[in-house]
Structures are given as C-alpha cells and as structure tokens.
Image (tube, rainbow, N blue to C red):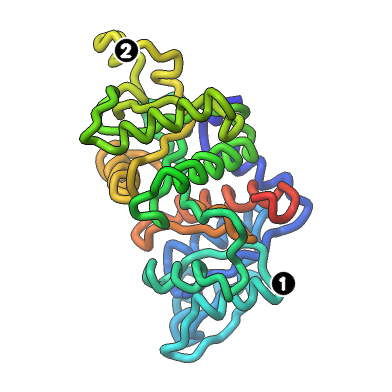
Amino acid sequence: MALTNFDQIVERAKQSFRKERVVIAGADSENILLGAFKAQEAGFVSPVLVGEPAKILPMLEKLGLQDQPYRLVATQPGNKVAQAAIDLINMGEGDVLMRGNTQTRDFLMPLLEKSNGLRTDRRLTHIDLVSMPDYHKLIAIGDVTVTIEPNLNQKRQIIQNMVETLESIGCEKPNIALLTLVEKVTFHMASTVEAQRLVLEHSQTPLANCNLWGPIAYDLILSKEAARLKNYDCPYCGDFDGIVAPSLLAANLLVKSLKMHAKASTCGVIVGAKVPVALTSRSDSPEIAFQSLAFCSALNLRPQNTL
C-alpha cells in the first residue's frame, strides 16, 4: 500500500494503546513545543521537557501551554541537555528522543557514542518522509544527517533501514531508487558504479524486501514523462517510494530545496537506535515537529528493538 499523505501516519500513531513519552532535549524551542503539545492533544505522546526551567517555563506561558500536562526535568545552565535526555531514555523514562533547541552536532554526538547505550548493531540512519504537491505519494529520502559519504556497505545498511522503516508504516515492498547524477554507469563517477553493483547483488540475494533500481537520475525517479522522453526503460519511474542519496550533502540539499522551493512538507526520524529519534530543523514549522512525532509513534507500534 502506498503512503499518500501524512494523515495516514497520524492515524497509525493513534492506534497505540499508550502515549509515547517524548523526551525533548532542549525544550525551549517554540515550534517543537507547539508540535509536541499538538501531538499530545491528538493522543499519541506525552511531553518530557528537558532543559533550563528559566527558558522553558516563560516559553510555555508565552504559548499558552503552561496548564497542559507535561513533565519538566531541569538541567543547569551549560549542562549537556542531550546527555540528560539520553540518560532518561536509558532509565526507562522515555520512549522517543527528540532534538529541541540544541545544535545538531551536540545532539548527535552523545547519541552516536556507544557507551551511552542507545546504539544497536544497526547503522543509525536519518530518513525524511516528503510530501510534494505534484507527486502522488510520500517519498522517503536518506541518509539526511548521519553518514556523510556512505561507502558500499553503509549504503546496504541505509537501504535496509529505509525499507524496514517504510514497511513498518504500511508501505509493502517499496520501490527504492539509488540516486546518482546520471542514469548510466560512468566509471569516473563512483556512485553510479556502486549503484550498479548494489542492484546486481540485490538481484542475486535480496538486501531487503524491495524493488531496487539504479543508477538513476532525479528526474527519472519522479517522472514517467521524463523516462518516456529519454527512452529510459524502468517500470518504477514516477512511482518510487524511497531515494537513497549518494551522500549526506545530496540528501540534505534535496530535502531543504524541496521544502524551500517546492512547498514540500516533511518529517524526519533517525532509525537504528533503541528508540526512534525525532530530528527536525529548528526552523521547521510546528506541523513538521508534529508529523515527526507521529512518525516515531507509528514506528514504536512494532516490537521493541526491531527498528
């Protein structure tokens, strides 16, 4: 089943028999708070606010949220709020981790540290779901934040994470594109060679339960008409469910460009840790924060640690 809009993700999140305790690292973020409390009103999360009370409490009052249910875990000025939030997760006091008003690096570094206990034997992968006005369904893009220049083995793991993530929210046997600059194998472009190798491997021993295609350029991923005009023979053009980018730069720029210039809506989650991790830009809207929490809650419907 194709995922056509974010309402399907929200409805799936609402199927949970409990509210997911979302631990927000650096909760003095206006749009994150608005998104989190909207998710609480929708019935699928309970906010745990981590940070300096002197920053969080006035913001709650400013937003008219001071009388809503929440738990506040105070940290001292200068303390590492990401570490405090991770400690709560490890103590069994949270089900979802979320980045609030803290730098991406400061948030990710303790998450990546194996001694902190959230890492599993799986690669952490940041996957964004994107809704575009002129594309008929949601499309996943990764890795957007974690792996800078994925090698061949890391790309295998990103593919597996993306497929399992899409399957867990109802997209069965997704069509996955290996994005490259051009759709022909060009030996001075390593990404095209690696894409060809991955597709060949997949045809012999499937990497995941998906249809994998590449190398393929961006226009061919999204447009059947582009494929017709280029005489490009691929049954999935205009119907892909996921894009594995050749680098973090390509994925990140693609997502931000779609949001800024194509009026796309997104939500982002890091998978591969013991709990889902909601990661959005601090400039993103409350709706994106809300959608990311719905995404996390939907993932948590699966048995613990299968994602």
Residue nearest the observer in this picture, 5 or 37: 5
Q: Which of label 2 and label 1 is nearer to you?
A: 2
Name the residue rendered at 38%, 58% in the picture.
281
Quadrant of image for the N terminus: top right
Residue denoted by label 2:
232
Residue sitting farthest toward the left: 188
The residue under label 2 is which amino acid type? Answer: Tyr
Callout 2: SS: loop
Q: Is residue 137 visible?
A: no
Q: For residue 280, which quarter of the picture?
A: bottom left
Name the residue rendered at 64%, 71% in the picture.
89
Is 279 located above or below residue 215 in the figure? Answer: below
CA gap between label 2 and label 1 equals 51 Å
Dot 2 or dot 1, earlier in sequence: 1
Residue nearest the observer in this picture, 230 or 253: 230
Query: How far across and down, in percent of the image, does residue 121 sit?
Result: 61, 58
Name the residue rendered at 69%, 55% in the picture.
305
Q: For residue 20, which quarter of the picture?
A: bottom right
Query: How far across and down, in percent of the image, does residue 301 sit?
Result: 71, 48
Residue denoted by label 1:
92
